[in-house]
Image: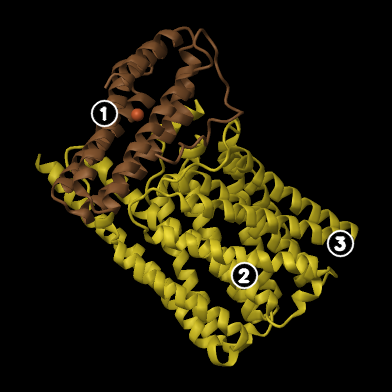
Chain colours: A yellow, B brown
Amino acid sequence: MQALLAFENAPPFAAPLRFFLTAPLFGVLAGLLIAFEGADVFASRWMPGALAATHLITVGFMLQVMLGALIQILPVVAGANLRQPLLIARLVHVGLSAGALMLAAGFLLGLPQLLGGGAVVLGMTVLAFLIVTAIALRGVPTTSPTIRGIKLSLFSLFAVVGLGIVMSLALAYGWPLPFSALTDLHAGWGLGGWAAVLLAAMAFVVVPMFQLTPGYPARSSWWFPIIMLAMLVVWSAALLLDLSVLARLGQLGAALAGIAFALQTMRLQAKRRRARPDATYRYWQLGLISSIFALFLLSTAALWPTAAELEGWTLVFGVLLVAGGFLPFITGMLYKIVPFLSWMHLQNTGQAKVPAPAMNKILAESGMHRQMLAYGLALILLLAAVFFPAWLARPAGLAFAVANGWLWWNLFSAIRRYRSHLADISRKLAAL
Amino acid sequence: MVVKAHPLWRNENEPSIAIGHAMTTIRSFMTDDHRRCDDLFADAEQAVAKKDFTLAGAAFGHFQSAMLAHFDSEEKTLFPTFEAKTGMSMGPTQVMRMEHVQLRALMNDAVDALKAGNSDDYLGLADTLVIMMQQHNMKEENILYPMCDQHLSDELPAVLERLETELCEE
Ligand SMILES: [Fe+2]
C-alpha cells in the first residue's frame, strides 16, 4: 500500500517551497552579520560572530532546504508518504527558522539561556520531523542506495542535534565538557553523517537524472553511507574512550570516503551527455572541487594534527566545505527543483488541455548563471578574508549577502512567474 | 553510444523471478528499454551540442518513436493486464498514463523547436523532458514494475513475450 499511495500523495507545492524561499534569506543574514562584525569573525572559529554565522548557514540555509526537499521527495524516491505534509511543513519551517535565529542570537550576544532555548526549539522541531518521517518510512524496504542513505542520514541528524543540545545546555548550566573535541564531533555528524550522506543519497538519483550520466556503481553507492557512519561511530567511541589516535583515524576515514564520493561524481559528470553545461552542472563542479580541497585539508590534519594549528587552517577548511561545497550543491539543485516543480504543478493544473511553459521560461539560464558568478566572487572573498580579515571581512560578508539575495530574487521571480502562469491557465481552462 | 546505461537499481539486491524466462523480470526488461530510450535521447543532445539540427532532428525522431513504442506496450499490454489482475484501474497505472500524455506533448514541442532550429527553445524543453521522463521512469522502475512482477507471476512468461515482440519490432 505504501508504494501505491506514492502516486497520489505528492505534497502540495507550498510544502517544500516555504523552505526553499526562506533558506537564501538566512544566507543574506549570515553575510550581513559578517559585514557588520568585520574582522573579528575571522579571528577564530570560536568567535561569537563566527559561531552565529556558521549556524545561520548550516541550520538556517542547509538544514532548511534539506528538510524541505525530504518532504518533497520521500514519496517519490522511497514511496514513503507523510501524513498531512503541509501541516508538517508549516510546523517544521517555523520551528527551524525560529530555532536558527535564537541559536545565532544566543551565540552572538553570549546569552546561554537564549542559546539553550534555541537548541531546545530546534531539537523539538527536528525530533517531531524525525518521528513523522520514521512513521512514513516504517515498512519501506531498503531497496536502493538512496533509501539506505536517507535512513542513515536521519540517524545522523538525530546525533548532531543531540550533541548540539547537550553542548548548549552544558554552556547554560556550566557543565564541564571537552567542548573543542565535542564541537568537532558535532560538526562531523552534521556535515558528514547528515549532510554528506543525504547529499550522496540525492546525488545517486539526480546526477544521472539531470546530467544524463551513467549511474553510480552499485557497490560503492550501497557502501558509502555505511562507511561514513561507521567512521563517525569510531570517532565518537574514541572520544568516549579518550583515544585521540582512533578519533583521528575516524576523521581520516570520513574524509577519504568523502573524497572518493566526490571523485566518483566528477568521473560521472565527465561522461555527461547533455547538450550544454548549465548552472546546476557548474555549481556542482564548484562544489566538488571545493570539497575535495577541504577534505584534503581534513585528512592532512588527521595525519598531522599540528597542521590544524596553522593560521587560518580550520577557517579555510570550514569556508571551503560549507560555502564552497555544500551551498553550491544545494543551490545547483534548487535551480532544477524549483522550475521543475513549478512546471509540474502548472502541467497538472492544465490537465493536458492548456500547455505549461517549459522550465527555462520560468527561470532563465542567464539569471542563474550571473548569480553563480556573484556567488563565486563571494566565495573567493571569504577565503581571502581568512588571511586579510581587516581588509576583506566586510566586503566578503557583503558579497555573500548579495549573492544569496540574488539567489532569493531568482527563486522568488520564478515563483511569481509560476503564479501568473497559474492564473492564466486557470482562466483558459474556465473559458474552454 | 560509448556509455553503458546505468545499473542504478538493477544490482545484486534485486529479486529475480525465474519462471521459464531465464531470470528476466518485467522490471529488468522494461528498465533496459528505458535505458535504450535514454541513449537515443543522448544522441539527439549530442547533435544539438554540435549545432547539427538535421542530425538532431533525425536522432530525436528515433528517440520519440522508441518512447512511443514503450508507452504503447505499457498502455496496451502491461497496464491492462495489471489492472485486470489487481482490479486497480484508477491507481498507479492511471497516473502513469497521465504522465505519458505530458511526455508526448513535450516531445511534440521539442520536435517543433528542432524543426524551427530554435536551440534555446529546444534546450528548455529538453531540460523539462529529461526530468519529467527520468522521474516517471523512476516511479515505474522502483514501484510499478516491481508490483507487476509481484502480481503477475503467473502471467509473466506470456506478458514478457508480448512485450518483447512489441518492443523489438520497430
Ligand atoms: Fe511509462
Q: How far is disc 2 from disc 1 in space, using C-alphas?
A: 54 Å
Identify the subunit bearing mark 3. Answer: A
Q: What element carries label 3?
A: helix
Residue B144 occupies quadrant = top left
Please rate how many residues cluster around mark 3, counting C-alpha atoms within 10 Å: few if below 14, some from 14 to 19, many from 20.
some
> What label sits on residue A245 in the rendered view?
3
Are the residues under badges 2 and 3 in a single subunit?
yes
Tag 2: amino acid: Leu
Quadrant occupied by the C terminus of chain A: top left
> Seen from this angle, which residue lies furthest bottom?
A390
Q: How far apart are the alpha carbons under marks 1 and 3?
A: 60 Å
The part of the image, by quadrant, that contains residue B23 is top right
Residue A107: x and y in percent read 65, 76
Tag 3: amino acid: Val
Residue in the picture at 38% in, 45% down: A12
Q: How crowded is mark 1: few (under 14 residues within 10 Å), some or many (20 or more)?
A: some
Discs 2/3, front: 3
Q: Which chain carries label 2?
A: A
* Residue B58 in the image, given as x and y percentages of width and height: 21, 39
Where A255 falls versus B20 (above or below)?
A: below
Which circle, 2 or 1, is nearer the viewer? 1
Identify whether A212 is placed above or below A185: above
Residue A76 in the image: x percent, y percent?
Answer: 45, 38
Residue A407 visible in the displayed image:
yes
Which residue appears at 66% of the width and 80% of the height? A48
Tell me the residue at 56%/83% (across/down). Answer: A384
Left or right, A331 with reference to B122: right
**Foreground residue, A48 or A289?**
A289
Check disc 2 and report the residue beneath it.
Answer: A103
Relative image position of residue B64 (x, y in whole percent): 25, 34
